[in-house]
Image: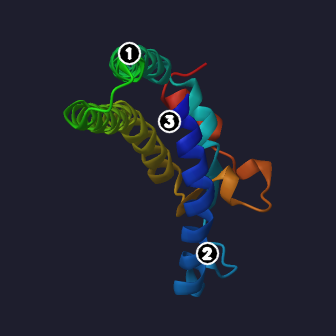
Amino acid sequence: MTYLKKFETLSRRFIPAIAFCMMVAAPGAFAASGSQKIGVIDYGKIFQQMPETKAADQSLQAARNQTNSELSKLQSTLQNAVQAYQKAGKPNATKEKELRAQDENFRKAVAEKQGALAKKEQDLVAPIRQKIDAAVESIAKKEGYNMIFDKGARVYGDAEFDITFKVMDQLNIK
């Protein structure tokens, strides 16, 4: 679940920063007044338990396996060519140039494949996040929450403000 780890890392970095900026920029919004209703969710838990996440993980793992297989073949071909050149024992500028070009092509292929995997991961994760965000927004509007924060961004919070299970119920996650 590489994308889950990346998401958790990013959310742990950015959500506290965003919350801090909001508190600094709009102190009146955080004043102790009865009209503010703030909730928290465990976004990572919801994301991890979504059925779509499991399907996305399987799809991504299949793509990784295929990519690794393709890259292994290219690397093996390159290594065989280098070994054959070394066994020949004679310096050959033309052959060395070909090997450098082959190595450069391998490096480009690695970069392209990694980029394609990252894009596929983003394409698979984005709809899941949108679905969760829509459920959070729906509950927030229905129940009058002004702000919803991720649990990872809070220092302290009363459990009564945790709406994780409400979101999971809305998404039919058991």
* Residue 127 - label: none
**Residue 102, quarter of picture:** top left
Q: Is residue 167 visible?
A: no
> Is 113 on the left or on the right of 148, as rendered?
left
Dot 2 corresponds to which residue?
Answer: 20
Q: Is residue 123 left or right of residue 60?
A: left
Residue at position x 53%, y 44% in the image: 7
Mark 1, other Cα within 10 Å: few <14 / some 14–19 / many ≥20: few
Q: CA distance from mark 2 to mark 3?
A: 25 Å
Q: In the image as oriented, which residue stretches furthest toward the left?
A: 94
Image spot of residue 125 (x, y percent): 40, 34
Label 3 neighbourhood size at 10 Å, few (<14), some (14-19), many (20+)?
Answer: some
Any mark on residue 80, and which?
A: 1
Say what amino acid the circle numbered 1 marks. Asn
Q: Which residue is mark 3?
A: 3
Q: Amino acid at mark 2?
A: Phe
Can you tell which of label 1 and label 2 is closer to the viewer? 1
Q: Name the quadrant of the C terminus.
A: top right
> Is disc 2 placed on a helix, strand or loop?
helix
Q: Nearer the viewer, mark 2 or mark 3?
A: 3
Identity, as a three-letter code, of the amino acid under mark 3: Tyr
Q: Which sits earlier in the primary sequence, circle 1 or circle 2? A: 2
Marks 2 & 3, CB-CB < 8 Å contact: no
**Image location of residue 119, percent across then percent down:** 31, 37
**Cα distance between the residues tagged 1 and 3:** 34 Å
Residue placed farthest to the front in the image? 90
Residue count near mark 2 (Cα–Cα under 10 Å), binned few <14, some 14–19, many ≥20: few
Q: Mark 1 or 3 closer to N-term?
A: 3
User: Secondary structure beneath disc 3?
Assistant: helix
